[in-house]
Amino acid sequence: MKTGAIDTFRPKNDPHDFQKTLLNVAKGAFRFTTTLAGRKRDIRTQIRSATIGIRGTDVWGKAEDARDFVVLLEGKIDIERGGQTYAMATPLTLFMAPRGQAALPIGPVDPDDLARWAQETEPQAAAGARDIDGGFRVNLASLPDPAAAEDLVNRLAAAGYAANSESASSGGRTVSRVYIDGYASEADAQTSVATLRAAFGLTSPWISRGSP
C-alpha cells in the first residue's frame, strides 16, 4: 500500500459481463466520462496517490508534484488511498490528497477553481480535437500491400493515434486505406494532417466528411 497515493478508483457494481480498464496518470490533468449503457465496466484510474473507481460517472482530476485531487462532476465513485476508502456521490465535490499527508475532508469545489482547472482538459478549437461524434476523417494513405498498411497502423498506435485500415477501391484496384476517424471539425482534421504528415512522412493525406 502507498501512503499519500490514490490506490483504486472503481465502480460500485460487480457485473458478470464487464470490461476491465486501468488508466494510469503519472502527472497532469485528466477528465473521464462513462455511462451505464451497454457492457458493464470495471474502470480504474490511478493518479499516483490514489485509485478511483468509475461507474456512470463524469470525473476530473490531476496529479501534481505536491498533491493529487479529484472532482466528481456527476455519478458516484470510490477512492482508495492508503488503505482507506472514500465514497463520493455528491456532484461538484472535491477530494484533495497532499503528497505524503492525510487526505483533506471531501467538500464542495470552488467554481472558479474548477473552471480554471477544466481548461487543461477541454479541447481547444482547431487543435486536432477528436470526439466520439466527430464527423471528419483523416485519410492517411492508400497502400497496395495490406502488410504495409498494418505496419503504419501499428506505428501510429505506438504514437498514440487511433488509426484503422480498410479495403477500398482506388483507380480500379483494391488498396488498404489507413485512416483516423472522429475529428470534431475540418480545422481539427487539418491540424492533425500537418502533424502526421511531418511525423510519419506521409505524402498526400486528405480529409473527408465521415466515411468516404
Image: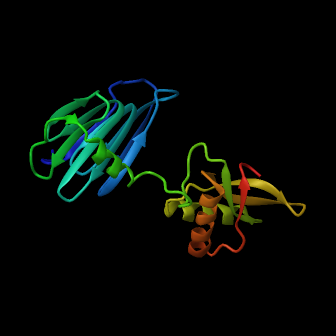
Rendering colour mode: rainbow
Residue at 70% over, 67% down? 205
Whether residue 44 can be seen here: yes
Whether residue 92 sits left or right of residue 18 in the image: it is: left
Instruction: Determine the residue located farthest toward the left in the rendered image.
Output: 101
Whether residue 153 sits left or right of residue 99 in the image: it is: right
Residue at 21% over, 37% down? 80
Residue at 43% over, 39% down? 33
Please state the horizontal and vertical placement of residue 143, each as a whole percent of the image: 74, 66
Please state the horizontal and vertical placement of residue 140, each as a whole percent of the image: 68, 64
Please state the horizontal and vertical placement of residue 62, each as a whole percent of the image: 29, 51
Quadrant of the rendering where the N terminus is positioned: top left
Residue 114 vs residue 46, the one in the foreground: 114
Please state the horizontal and vertical placement of residue 50, each as a whole percent of the image: 23, 44
Residue 86 vs residue 2, the one in the foreground: 86
Is 71 situated above or below 140?
A: above
Whether residue 9 sits left or right of residue 155 in the image: it is: left
Whether residue 46 can be seen here: no
Is 80 situated above or below 120?
A: above
